[in-house]
């Protein structure tokens, strides 16, 4: 993936396979996922529900919920294998160098403590600040993420804030340590479109200003298209296409990416309700992956050999690659 | 339009009592009221799709619930095929109930988990006496064919189906009564993109084949752009702009519509440095004086804070409620 002379990427996963357990037994949620992100770069993990994008994000932090585990591959942080790090180093990286925000900020905030209590607690733990300094920094951070009247907001409880404001609070806590990498799992999915636009503009600004890297998980092609330098398209646990956003959207190569882009209604009014192109069937349930290419059952270009071919990207990052050897 | 509309809503008002605070009660203050709809009027023509778009709390679902008699409006009139929906009684009311069918966002919540799909689809028709017991199976098969599901699905329960299949079942059941109007409230919002396209195409087919009319409520502008002939844009309980979808989306006249279009995540454009719209939607308990959009509007003037804007009319029934009517970005090739 990297030549010997070039520096290691900030974060890289190679051949990452994650095993999970549900009521039917153990299954592979991701298969041989490889990705890399560098300082100041944003990567979008795009896919439909159950494709393994969120679990990939957790696996990057080594946070696969028990009894699931990483069963193959490796994750490196600044060139060092996650497994070679000591517990305290991992704690420091997770607490300081990498931050994460989620879809539902309400479930990440404790309803019985004020915003101020929670933000300052984080700052005191992560930055070893004294109470007064933490309070001051908390106010600054809330200001930075565009919360009006931050001093007053610190005294409020989570339920007194709107969803958009709660997400801003989460972002304020996430950027407190000036992390190198922000992992964002559907951060705007629960928000109205004008608030989504505000939050994404805020994240883009922070990325620019702090040279922060970002991995954004989303099901929304538009959100990824507008906010990411690179796109990894996931289907049924595999990355089926990878490349610079512009290339993937202009010249999609994998039949799934092509189908997905054709299926999305556009804002220009076509009139007459001209049928959208569709992909037949539905995404497979996690744990019921077919042999060979996972997309072959819905793919109009599928051939007999698709049942046996291994799924691997033909071109490794940072170029534009597709996991389909049939359609080029 | 000379033709009388199939469905018309005139000056609809609806508010809900908020929870009173204990202190407020002791002080004898009345409970606050949340304004869901404030003087909303709209029409639906025959074989037309009216899209209603707006953010959460704009009142779009409340309109649907008032039309289908799930919420009683405080004031205003809803007329369907010449009948007042809220005055009708007996056979006339049953006829209206048959003719106005609703489809919701979550088909799993709308289906009885213990009832077979075949029975769930045929039951409304049985209740309304459109078919006898012996006709149930044939009707279920006919409707499963119509919505593109295999007949074997009739024996299954909802649990065995995917989200897209369940939404097809909910559509089949709505069609069982041969309704004249379907009201779909965020009916494709929970579906994955590849499945959403299938359901949108199904709605398109139904519109073409069954001479239906439809009110399609969605927060997704692209879905409205695809399906709706006309659109009503709502903000805080009021329609702020309405007209043919092509006109409104290509040439928005209300600053809020323009902001929604700009905030929509486009595939082609890179995001701009500033958000399309600052601030948040105000509380429906305390709707701003004057134009309700003035607190977030970059074009707001003094008069916008003082009085409600009147309707400004443009070509082909395109209307916008704005004092200023600023020059807005137009989207010839959005």
Image (cartoon, coloured by chain):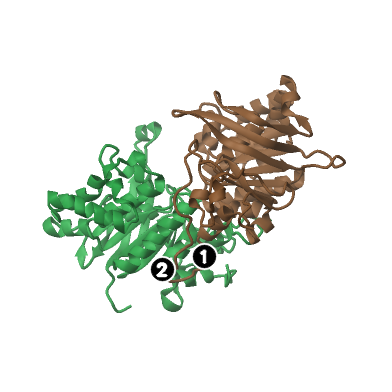
- Disc 2 element: strand
Q: Mark 1 = which residue?
A: B303
Where, quadrant-wise, is the C terminus of chain A in this rendering? bottom right
Q: Residue at x 32, y 41 (%)?
A: B158
- Name the one closer to the observer, B297 or A264: A264
User: Residue A102's x, y, as percent?
Assistant: 58, 37
Q: What chain is tagged by disc 2? A: B
| Position above or below: B240 against A100 | below
Q: With B306 as the anchor, is B187 left or right in this view? A: left
- Decide which of tag 1 and tag 2 comes sooner along the chain: 2
- Name the one closer to the observer, B69 or A72: A72
Whole-Å distance between the Cαs marked 1 and 2? Answer: 29 Å
Q: Residue at x 26, y 42 (%)?
A: B116
User: Residue B322's x, y, as percent?
Assistant: 49, 67
Q: Residue at x 72, y 25 (%)?
A: A83
User: Residue B86's x, y, as percent?
Assistant: 21, 57
| Position above or below: B32 against B308 | above
For chain A, what colour was chosen? brown
Is residue A151 visible in this depiction of the protein? no
Q: Mark 2 = which residue?
A: B230
- Name the one closer to the observer, B262 or B140: B140
| Position above or below: A216 against B94 | above
For chain B, what colour was chosen? green
């Amino acid at each position: 993936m990297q030549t010997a002379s070039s520096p290691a990427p900030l974060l890289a996963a190679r051949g990452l396979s994650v095993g999970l357990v549900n009521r039917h037994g153990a299954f592979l949620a991701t298969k041989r996922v490889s990705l890399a992100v560098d300082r100041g770069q944003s990567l979008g993990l795009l896919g439909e529900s159950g494709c393994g994008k969120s679990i990939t994000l957790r696996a990057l932090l080594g946070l696969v919920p028990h009894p699931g585990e990483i069963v193959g591959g490796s994750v490196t942080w600044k060139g060092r294998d996650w497994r070679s790090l000591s517990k305290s180093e991992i704690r420091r990286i997770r607490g300081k160098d990498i931050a994460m925000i989620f879809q539902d900020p309400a479930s990440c905030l404790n309803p019985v403590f004020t915003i101020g209590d929670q933000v300052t607690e984080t700052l005191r733990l992560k930055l070893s600040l004294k109470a007064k300094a933490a309070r001051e920094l908390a106010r600054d951070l809330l200001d930075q993420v565009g919360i009006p009247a931050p001093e007053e907001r610190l005294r409020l409880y989570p339920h007194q804030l709107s969803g958009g404001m709660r997400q801003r609070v989460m972002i304020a806590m996430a950027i407190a340590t000036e992390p190198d990498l922000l992992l964002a799992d559907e951060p705007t999915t629960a928000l109205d479109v004008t608030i989504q636009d505000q939050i994404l503009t805020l994240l883009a600004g922070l990325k620019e200003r702090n040279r922060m890297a970002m991995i954004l998980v989303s099901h929304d092609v538009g959100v990824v298209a507008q906010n990411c330098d690179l796109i990894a398209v996931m289907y049924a646990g595999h990355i089926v296409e990878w490349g610079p956003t512009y290339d993937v959207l202009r010249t999609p190569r994998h039949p799934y990416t092509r189908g997905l882009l054709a299926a999305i209604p556009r804002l220009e009014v076509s009139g007459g309700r001209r049928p959208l192109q569709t992909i037949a069937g539905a995404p497979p349930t996690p744990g019921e992956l077919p042999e060979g290419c996972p997309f072959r059952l819905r793919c109009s270009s599928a051939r007999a050999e698709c049942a046996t071919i291994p799924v691997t990207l033909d071109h490794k990052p940072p170029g534009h690659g597709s996991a389909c050897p049939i359609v080029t | 339009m000379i033709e009388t509309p199939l469905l018309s809503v005139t000056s609809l008002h609806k508010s809900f009592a908020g929870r009173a605070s204990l202190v407020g009660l002791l002080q004898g203050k009345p409970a606050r009221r949340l304004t869901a709809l404030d003087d909303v009027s709209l029409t639906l023509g025959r074989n037309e799709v009216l899209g209603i778009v707006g953010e959460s709390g704009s009142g779009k679902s409340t309109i649907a619930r008032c039309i289908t008699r799930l919420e009683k409006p405080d004031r205003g009139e809803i007329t369907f095929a010449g009948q007042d929906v809220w005055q009708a009684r007996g056979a006339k009311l049953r006829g209206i109930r048959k003719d106005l069918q609703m489809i919701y966002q979550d088909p799993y919540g709308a289906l009885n988990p213990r009832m077979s799909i075949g029975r769930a689809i045929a039951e409304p028709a049985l209740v309304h006496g459109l078919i006898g017991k012996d006709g149930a199976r044939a009707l279920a098969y006919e409707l499963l064919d119509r919505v593109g599901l295999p007949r074997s699905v009739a024996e299954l329960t909802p649990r065995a189906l995917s989200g897209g299949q369940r939404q097809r079942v909910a559509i089949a059941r709505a069609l069982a009564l041969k309704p004249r109007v379907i009201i779909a409230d965020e009916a494709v919002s929970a579906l994955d993109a590849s499945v959403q396209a299938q359901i949108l195409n199904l709605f398109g087919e139904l519109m073409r084949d069954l001479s239906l009319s439809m009110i399609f409520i969605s927060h997704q502008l692209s879905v409205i752009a695809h399906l709706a002939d006309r659109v009503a844009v709502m903000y805080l309980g009021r329609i702020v702009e309405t007209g043919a979808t092509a006109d409104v989306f290509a040439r928005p006249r209300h600053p809020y519509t323009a902001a929604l279009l700009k905030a929509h995540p486009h595939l082609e454009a890179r995001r701009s440095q500033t958000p399309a719209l600052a601030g948040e939607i105000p509380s429906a308990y305390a709707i701003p004086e004057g134009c309700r959009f003035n607190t977030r509007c970059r074009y707001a003037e003094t008069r916008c804070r003082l009085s409600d804007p009147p309707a400004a009319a443009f070509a082909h029934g395109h209307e916008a409620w704005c004092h200023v009517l600023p020059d807005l970005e137009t989207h010839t090739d959005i």
